[in-house]
Image: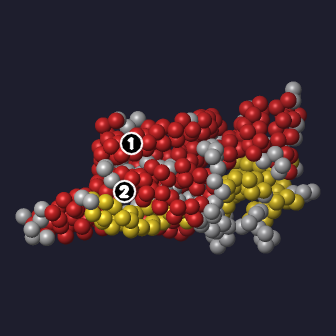
Amino acid sequence: MFKFFFIFFFAFFFISCSTHQKDNVLYQHELVSQNCSENFFTQELNELKKENDVIFKGLNAGYIARDCKKFKLSNEFFDLSEESYKYDVDLQSDSSKILKSAASTLINNTIFDYQGFYYERTMLNLTKALNFMSLGDFANARIEFNRALMRQEKAKEYFAFYLEQNRKELDKAKKEDENFEQNIEKNSKFIAREYENLFKDFKISENFTNPYVTYVSAVFFFMDRDYRKAYDLLKEVFVLHSKNEEMQKQFQIFNQFAKSLNPKKLKKHIFIIYENGLAPAFDEFSLTLPFIFDKKIVSASVALPILQKRSSSFEYLSVLDANENLQTQNLFDFDAIVASEFKTNLTPIITQALLTTILKTSVNVAVANNDNTGILSLVSNLFSILSTRADLRFWNFLPKNAQIAMLENKGFVEILTPMQNSIYSSNLDKNKDILILVRSFTTQISPRIYIIEN
């Protein structure tokens, strides 16, 4: 009997003790190598169709497909991820949520499919929209931009509901755990103090919207000749950056087009968007904390995720035409966006980790008190130690920051690095508005250039 028990235990253990860090490394390697392997995409699509961690795999594989300029395939991945958001996250039944909550409390969140951060949802629709623009399908791009903007409007409502659910869970724990003050309240405060050092390295915003999404949407509607909507959207970004000269210039141009009775006679423009570096990743750290069980103090480990800043690429890009020499302006800080949402989610993250530790430790204590052989106690403790892991899944390829520049379309543009190395140079159609999106992960990898005209 023990033989079969151990076989089951270790099979389950290997599933439950994963942080998914190796999956992050796999996706990062696939993007950097730029193999654009059909086998890779086929394998990932098959996994998604089996409903195997659809959001996590779809976001990362979809971005790699975009990086290979396989825009239709990229949106196929993103569509599956978005469908999973809708049915597995947004519309999840109460019974499913209760079952998941109970299981994740007993083991950890890594055994379930990834549900993602809210900022990833808006960026999903934004990236789908950019894919459609690259395909020349502005009608579907408009739909995706509107979805991204709608998600932003619902952000505050989403977080209010999320935090209220956590409050209810805390109230329940307070009633059920006679040692709530030590096991939850004091340990929560101790962990929160540990996190404070982390947040010193990040700018934290109380605003749950991503102004980069609003800005790119404004550029799209400008290029789609919906100048009034473009102006209204840019006005939201301008309020945040009203002292920036580049934003002042763009705001004046958008205002001019919105008020013009005949905008067709006005000049065309080139928009430069530079997505720089990589947004924060996640790592795991563990703390040993005191808990009270049966009037005795027991030490137990808690595993939590921690943000890690990643590198930027070129500090800025220079943009040249026949008469102008501009530098891109860094206006959109994704480090701050990621850290702000992470901090908002921190209380629920800490609560979940503590409840998991309390449940596992109480099981260990109960087993130890009723196990004469010591074998079950050993297995129970081993399971607790090895399954105490943080969930480190995330969308690996969002930028560290986004920078912008705009100039009149005079039929030519060149883009250079700070070392004056040219990364793009071309004659352009002066009768079109043009978006040039530069994506640079590191200075050691050639930037990806996306050209969109209308």
> Which of the 4 image quarters holds residue 419?
bottom right
Q: What residue is rendered at 9% in x and 68% in y?
A: 372
Please provide percent x and percent y for residue 24: 46, 63
Label 2 to label 1: alpha-carbon separation: 14 Å
Residue 171 is tagged as 1
Q: Indicate the amino acid at tag 2.
A: Asn
| Residue situated in front as seen by the camera: 109 or 162 | 162
- Callout 2: few (<14), some (14-19), or many (20+) C-alpha neighbours within 10 Å? many
Give SS at disc 1: helix
Please provide percent x and percent y for residue 217: 68, 41
- Give the quarter of the figure containing the C terminus: top right
Give SS at disc 2: helix
Q: What residue is rendered at 22% in x and 62% in y?
A: 364
Please provide percent x and percent y for residue 52: 35, 51
Residue 183 is tagged as 2
| Residue situated in front as seen by the camera: 249 or 198 | 198
Q: Is residue 3 left or right of residue 402?
A: left
Task: Give above or below for 431 relative to 302.
Answer: above
> Which of the 4 image quarters holds residue 379?
bottom left
- Callout 1: few (<14), some (14-19), or many (20+) C-alpha neighbours within 10 Å? few
